[in-house]
Image (tube, rainbow, N blue to C red):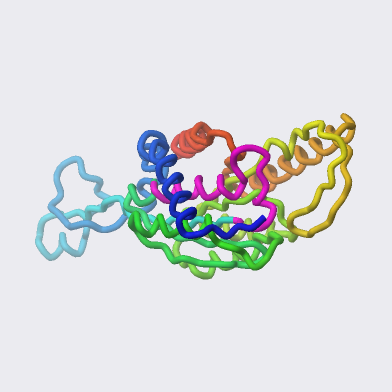
């Protein structure tokens, strides 16, 4: 499939995503996003005189000794945060059995998160990856910046077809010295091991996995014998979907793969959000935000 979009078509697609995500950003994500990620740290604000009821642990003894009266250090929540979107653009994401490809859902979800971030006065950056890191856009603020990220996700033509998360996670750890909130958005059909770097990254950053799928990958329809081609390797095989046993086996393999991904992420202390192309995603994110807020 040719993923290149002419300029007019691309602008229309970007505009459609901006319109579709407006409701989610304004009515669903905005308040919950803020509640979930507020107060990532504390920064010094000022020194003021002590008043009864203040925490004595906040007393600034140097100023107190110099002035002869007790003073305390006042801190405020460090509001500005950096969010990194690490998005899989490999060939397996060019699949969609309904109205939406997995890659388009990934772009839309990333857009919602990006618009929510700038509403929260956060900076947002992007890493696109396939077999290697394909593109890096440093974190910035502003609507124009977010629209640029959306354009890149929709129009980018990757050099590689396969998928390997390890180089992307390693790159993130090198370009982000401070702890950042990171959304790893992928179908997680990885050809190489990534467990070690996943755990390292989860210790250094607030890592959240967003698993993009399609219901047809789990429940195959009865459409007779089909020539199934692996988008990443090019390997082809005939699959008899008229056989209930074959369909059940294919579905079972996908279910086991999903369970293995969830277990791996659970052991690494990573929250997982599972989404399907062509289906609403607000409820899953709302549940994620509520879960994170309750743990604060």
Instruction: Give the extent of the magenta segment.
Output: 88-115
Q: Position of residue 107 (x, y in %)?
A: 52, 50
Quarter the C terminus occupies: top left
Q: Position of residue 130 (x, y in %)?
A: 64, 62
Residue positioned 64% across, 47% down in the render: 265
Q: Position of residue 62 (x, y in %)?
A: 20, 64
Say whether residue 105 is magenta: yes
Q: Quadrant of residue 82?
A: bottom left
In this orientation, which residue lies closer to the viewer: 94 or 146? 94
Residue positioned 53% across, 33% down in the render: 280
Q: Position of residue 268 (x, y in %)?
A: 63, 50
Residue positioned 27% across, 51% down in the render: 76
Q: Residue furthest bottom?
A: 174
Q: Is residue 221 left or right of residue 164?
A: right
Say whether residue 133 is magenta: no
Q: Principal SS element in the magenta part?
A: helix
Q: Is residue 264 left or right of residue 12?
A: right
């Amino acid at each position: 499939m040719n993923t290149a979009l002419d300029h007019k078509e691309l602008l229309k697609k970007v505009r459609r995503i901006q319109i579709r995500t407006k409701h989610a950003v304004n009515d669903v994500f905005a308040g919950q996003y803020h509640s979930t990620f507020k107060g990532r740290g504390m920064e010094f604000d000022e020194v003021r005189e002590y008043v009864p009821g203040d925490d004595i642990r906040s007393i600034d003894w140097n100023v107190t000794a110099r002035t002869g009266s007790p003073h305390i250090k006042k801190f405020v929540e460090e509001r500005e945060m950096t969010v990194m979107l690490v998005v899989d653009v490999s060939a397996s994401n060019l699949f969609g059995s309904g109205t939406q490809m997995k890659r388009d859902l990934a772009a839309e979800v990333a857009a919602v998160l990006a618009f929510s971030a700038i509403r929260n006065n956060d900076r947002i950056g992007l890493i696109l990856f396939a077999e290697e890191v394909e593109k890096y856009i440093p974190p910035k603020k502003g609507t124009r910046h977010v629209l640029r990220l959306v354009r890149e996700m929709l129009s980018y033509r990757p050099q590689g077809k396969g998928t390997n998360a390890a180089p992307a996670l390693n790159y993130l750890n090198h370009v982000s010295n401070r702890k950042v909130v990171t959304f790893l958005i992928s179908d997680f059909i990885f050809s190489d091991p990534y467990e070690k770097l996943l755990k390292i990254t989860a210790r250094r950053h607030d890592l959240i996995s967003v698993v993009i799928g399609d219901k047809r990958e789990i429940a195959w329809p009865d459409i007779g014998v089909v020539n199934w081609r692996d988008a990443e390797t090019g390997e082809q095989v005939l699959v008899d979907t008229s056989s209930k046993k074959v369909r059940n086996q294919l579905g079972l393999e996908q279910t086991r793969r999903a369970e293995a991904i969830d277990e791996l992420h659970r052991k690494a202390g990573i929250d997982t959000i599972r989404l399907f192309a062509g289906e609403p995603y607000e409820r899953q994110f709302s549940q994620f935000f509520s879960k994170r807020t309750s743990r604060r």
